[in-house]
Image (cartoon, rainbow, N blue to C red):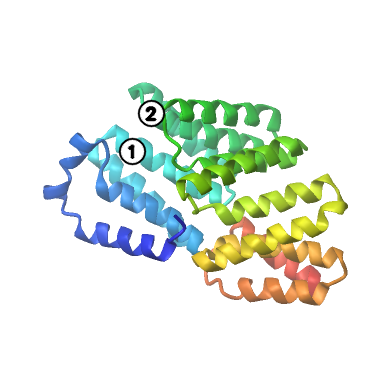
Amino acid sequence: MGKLLLAREHKEAAISLYDPARHGPFAKRTSFDAKGYALSYLGMTLWLLGYPDQALKRANEAVEFTQALSHPLSLAGAESFLGQVQQYRHEARAAQKTAERAIALSVEHGFTFWLAVATILRGWAIAEQGHQEEGIPQIHEGLAALRATGTEISRPYWLSLLAEACIESSLLDDGLSALAEALAVANETEGRGYEAEIYRLKGELLLRQGDSNAAEAQKCFERAIEIARNQSAKSMELRASMSLARLLAKQGKRDEACAILAQIYGWFTEGFDTADLKDAKALLDQLNA
């Protein structure tokens, strides 16, 4: 729902309350281990809140914890969530390897849901590495398999990965169609956790269609920043600020672009070796040159 600070509070409480002897056996009856999932969701929440390194640490902890449980379904979930954090960080090779581990585990045990999720992640990772013609069909395959399970959970996020892959392959109409569906599902299900990025990607796709869409694209970037700020989603705010700054710089408004980007970049205290923060630093240097 995009209530990230509250989500973090509850996940940290779940981890602190977990008693292996008392709560561990529930995994056999409920299909997942509470601590493993709490660690995974905390990892994703931390990235959204602007802590990329802590996010990866928690996601890796979830995998290590569920490996020790000898509970394959919890492990498949933890691997898939780790792949999602790696996708957030735009670590395509790492995400592909993680997704392939989740796929192998899911095929072995018949985990239909996690197979669908990991297939989408692998498709995104392959497309991100420049093989869109191979990756995009895998994303479609995973989306269809996920819908066949009857769930809509996180569908706006998965559709945004399709849209992102479409940008680089110039399938602009397909990308915009995916984002229109993502926003419709988000409105229907109150799934707001990735809403800011959906608006940012929409703006990028509109710009790829032509400069005549600049005003509409700017509104998308500004809407993305507004949503991200309301959610304390610093990582999303950084991405949207970069998109807006590039557009403003192209319009000759370099000082305004620099001020917007410098404000959010200056907030961060970690993750400076991740793709987003390196790109932000390079753009700031360019604007200040």
Left or right of 71 on screen, residue 228: right
Q: Is residue 172 visible?
A: yes
Residue 192, image x, y percentages = 50, 53
Q: Which residue is mark 2?
A: 105
- Residue beneath the point at 21% across and 39% down: 27
Considering depth in this image, is 53 or 166 the residue closer to the camera? 166
- Three-letter amino acid code at disc 2? Leu
- Circle 2 crowding by C-alpha within 10 Å: few under 14, some 14–19, many from 20: some
- Residue beneath the point at 51% across and 40% down: 155
Q: Is residue 129 visible?
A: no
Q: Which mark is residue 75?
A: 1
- Residue beneath the point at 47% across and 38% down: 98
Quadrant that contains the N terminus: bottom left
- Circle 1 crowding by C-alpha within 10 Å: few under 14, some 14–19, many from 20: many
| Mark 1, secondary structure of its residue | helix
Q: Are marks 1 and 2 in contact (CB under 8 Å)?
A: yes
